[in-house]
């Protein structure tokens, strides 16, 4: 009887030990951290088509502030506003009216004795559309009456194949103002454009001093694109890439 009792006690002890082991193993398995796989989100990039404005295109602009050979300095900047829309080579509006074309004063020469007028040499560096889209450009000053380039909605932007002559502002006119002239040679021999601002005759050698350039705010002239520019179709709203 005693032997049977001992066997029962031993069996019970074994059962307790096995039960504790199983419970401990289950507890350890339950506490093991669960590793979850991260989900990868694939974002598709939207490709926005761009349209080309060929070199030789003339952009019509209006000056937003005065330029003067008395006060302007080399390296200073100024802005102009586009007055007519610019179309791509296939008839899409890429630069609308109201866009800003930014310019830079490359050199200034004040009026000097001997009838030598003041001059201002400028270039144009960038265009900003009303929706914030910005592009760098390589542009130079030109006359609005030039036939070097045109932009319309039918044919649409085309440039003259002949080499464009770089123009500068030259002082002239009895009441100040400016004349468009070629950068070659300078002075009265370089005048090839019409009077933009002011009224009066041209500078003569008999004058003791030439006139300074005074290009008034609101003066209109052309920006000649020396290189082609690519832009997306203009859409109101956020900037396009």
Image (tube, grey):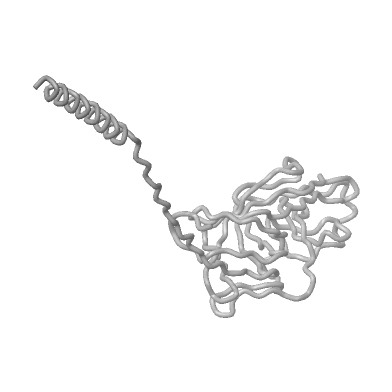
Height in image: 20 above or below 191? above
Query: In the picture, which quadrant includes the N terminus?
Result: top left
Report the residue that reaches farthest toward the bottom. 155
Q: Residue at x 63, y 52 (%)?
A: 102
Q: Quadrant of residue 194?
A: bottom right
Q: In the image, 226: left or right of 207? A: left
Percent x, y for residue 10?
19, 24
> Which one is nearer the viewer's eye here, 38 or 93?
38
Percent x, y for residue 179?
75, 58
Percent x, y for residue 135?
61, 56
Height in image: 227 above or below 20? below
> Which one is nearer the viewer's eye here, 237 or 82?
237
Q: In the image, 77: left or right of 90? A: right
Q: In the image, 95: left or right of 160? A: left
Q: Quadrant of residue 56?
A: bottom right
Q: Residue at x 67, y 45 (%)?
A: 77
Percent x, y for residue 158?
66, 75
Q: Residue at x 76, y 45 (%)?
A: 69
Q: Residue at x 42, y 53 (%)?
A: 41
Report the residue that reaches farthest toward the top. 2
Q: How many marks?
A: 0
């Amino acid at each position: 009887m005693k032997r049977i009792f001992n066997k029962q006690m031993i069996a019970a002890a074994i059962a307790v030990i096995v039960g504790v082991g199983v419970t401990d193993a289950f507890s350890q398995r339950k506490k093991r951290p669960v590793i979850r796989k991260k989900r990868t989100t694939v974002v598709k990039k939207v490709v926005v088509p761009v349209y080309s404005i060929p070199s030789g295109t003339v952009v019509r602009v209006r000056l937003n502030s005065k330029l003067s050979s008395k006060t302007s300095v080399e390296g200073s900047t100024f802005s102009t506003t586009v007055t007519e829309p610019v179309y791509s080579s296939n008839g899409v509006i890429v630069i609308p009216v109201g866009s800003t074309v930014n310019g830079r004063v490359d050199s200034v020469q004040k009026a000097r004795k001997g009838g030598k007028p003041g001059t201002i040499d400028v270039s144009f560096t960038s265009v900003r559309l009303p929706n914030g889209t910005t592009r760098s450009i390589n542009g130079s000053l030109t006359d609005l009456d030039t036939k070097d380039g045109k932009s319309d909605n039918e044919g649409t932007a085309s440039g003259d194949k002949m080499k464009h002559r770089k123009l500068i502002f030259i002082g002239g006119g009895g009441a100040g103002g400016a004349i468009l002239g070629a950068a070659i040679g300078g002075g009265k021999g370089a005048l090839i454009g019409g009077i933009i601002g002011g009224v009066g005759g041209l500078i003569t050698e008999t004058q003791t001093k030439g006139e300074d350039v005074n290009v008034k705010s609101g003066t209109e002239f052309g920006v000649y694109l020396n290189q082609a520019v690519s832009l997306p179709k203009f859409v109101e709203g956020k900037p396009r890439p």
